[in-house]
Amino acid sequence: MMELYHLRTFVAVAEERNLTRASERLFTSQPAISAHIKALEETLGVTLFDRTPKGMRLTSVGEDLLPRARRALAAAGDFVQHARSLRHEITGSVRIGLNTDARFLRVAALQTGLAARHPHLDVAMLGGTTWLNLPALRAGKLDAAFISGTFSDSDLTLHYLCDEPLVVAAPKAMRARITDVDIARLARLPWVFTSPDCAYFKVMHALFHANGCEPMRTLLADQEDAMIELVRAGVGLGIVRAGVIGGDADSAYELPVPLPSVPLQFAVLRERAGDLVIGALMEVLREVWELEMPVGVACEAG
Amino acid sequence: MMELYHLRTFVAVAEERNLTRASERLFTSQPAISAHIKALEETLGVTLFDRTPKGMRLTSVGEDLLPRARRALAAAGDFVQHARSLRHEITGSVRIGLNTDARFLRVAALQTGLAARHPHLDVAMLGGTTWLNLPALRAGKLDAAFISGTFSDSDLTLHYLCDEPLVVAAPKAMRARITDVDIARLARLPWVFTSPDCAYFKVMHALFHANGCEPMRTLLADQEDAMIELVRAGVGLGIVRAGVIGGDADSAYELPVPLPSVPLQFAVLRERAGDLVIGALMEVLREVWELEMPVGVACEAG
DNA sequence: CTGCGCCATCGCGTTTTCCGAACCCACGCT
DNA sequence: AGCGTGGGTTCGGAAAACGCGATGGCGCAG
């Protein structure tokens, strides 16, 4: 079976017209070169060179074949060259856990930024919630995740992205029963709860606790869009990010209850902070969210 | 060093997405395939496949490299395919000895015919004389030769081409001394001789011998064009082919002495009559000289 | 939890490859 | 004429590469 070294030898001999020089060029011995040519001629069934006392002279069929041998070698060279150029590219895959509305998280910009800079990085954006993402991150099912709220967890490095201002959303159908924004009165209306682990839950809890009352619980929704739909449908009041509801056409509206903000953060496992893939991810994330400070983790050279 | 079998294995595995199937396709074992991929990845410094429990899945860099691998294989395939197509072509070289004027021998037509049918046959037309060509033929310095005259030599096969009508050429400067064409009178004029081996010499010798006289010898010319020039220069009379001299502008003219013709023949060594190269040569020669009979030597299949 | 399909690894035998030495041949020099 | 030089080829043994069967680990389905 013909191999590349046959072709390499063929063009070397054709160019040097001398086995010894060709063997020096190829860092091997002269009998080896002779054997290559012999084997090549045998497998092709063709005589490539005339053996003269002055050296090797291409026959006309050798002359005819030489450019094709060069082409084949060039194609093979192009293959390895391209491979080498890909060698130090960021490669592999990242799975990013989302915790809320994809547009708010600017995942489109993140995706395009990653694709442009690192075309060989497979990116997966997986929907979820803050409290689904955290264990998934620790279990290695996610490489990074958006989370809402603050946590003191030495396993994770958190990157603050922005504050999420919250509001109380109410269905317009309940407007008749909401005469003012007295907290105790609101507590007697039905509420759509979030998971008790959710930062929003803590905000809600703090609101009522400060006023010495407990809200009425209807049901639980751990996805923001589910929550919004339930409020719109008139099931009850809920806490959502400011700006996601409202307007004349919407069947829900924001109540002017002052609420604290919750920080949106980006979490990665601390032990993976030096990872090249994570580094690339963070770099693009910083651009997308216009964060000034580069995270103080040096990339290790590959 | 990367070799073609690495690439062959690469595309086979990429297409089968399964080492075992790829190994069957390539008529080898699964561990061998595994090693090929491993070695290729190592020399390139990139990961080509994701190893999954369901098989081998191309990474995105593998995906990127695959078409280039295909191109390289295609180029190598083109090389061997072209070589194989050249496999049964007539190849090598023929050295043909000329014995007289190239135009008369139709060497241009012979050359173009050979070049058109057998582009990889190196043709050499070597000037000479009949009596230089014959020993060169036997010594293997020529593969074929034009000769004038007949010979009984069992080593050679001769192919009759045509008759060469001969004439006596005389310089116009001697016209005053040539009152008639009486042979005995002509014998007393100076003559340019040919080599004693030459057929022309025999013709001349026979001419005078029949008339019981000897021509006067000036010098010897064994090339026809030299002979003609000497005659034109007024050195003496000579025997040349009819039609090569004459006309108002020429300083030589033909004497009306009746002379026998000499056959022009094409000689090859009998032991080489079955040679493919000689066969190809004879075939074209027959066309050029419009010989009807194919020479009764069957070509042996290669 | 057992069986199946997949890939990676490990020795071992065999084939290929390579090398140095010796050889043949043509040419040029003495 | 003899001989040295430079070219390619051939030869035998050592070394490397290669391929194979067996084995192992792993995920998944029944």
Image (cartoon, coloured by chain):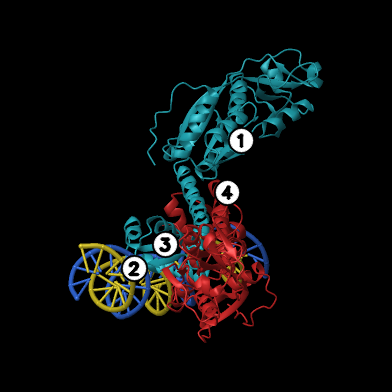
Chain colours: A red, B cyan, C blue, D yellow
Task: From this view, report whether residue A112 is shown above or below residue B203.
Answer: below
Helix, strand or loop for disc 2: helix
Residue picked out by circle 2: B31
| Contact flag, marks 4 and 3 (Cβ < 8 Å) | no
Question: Which amino acid, by three-letter code, is at mark 4?
Answer: Glu
| Contact flag, marks 2 and 1 (Cβ < 8 Å) | no
Residue under the image location 56 percent in, 54 percent down = A250
Question: Which amino acid, by three-letter code, is at mark 1?
Answer: Thr
Q: Which is more foreground, mark 3 or mark 1?
A: 3
Residue picked out by circle 3: B57
Discs 1 and 4 carry the same chain letter:
no
**Residue A145 seen in the figure:** no
Give the image location of residue A228, x and y in percent: 51, 61
Q: Rounded to the nearest whole Å, what is the CA distance between mark 2 and mark 4?
A: 40 Å
Residue picked out by circle 4: A63
Q: Rounded to the nearest whole Å, what is the CA distance between mark 1 and mark 4?
A: 34 Å
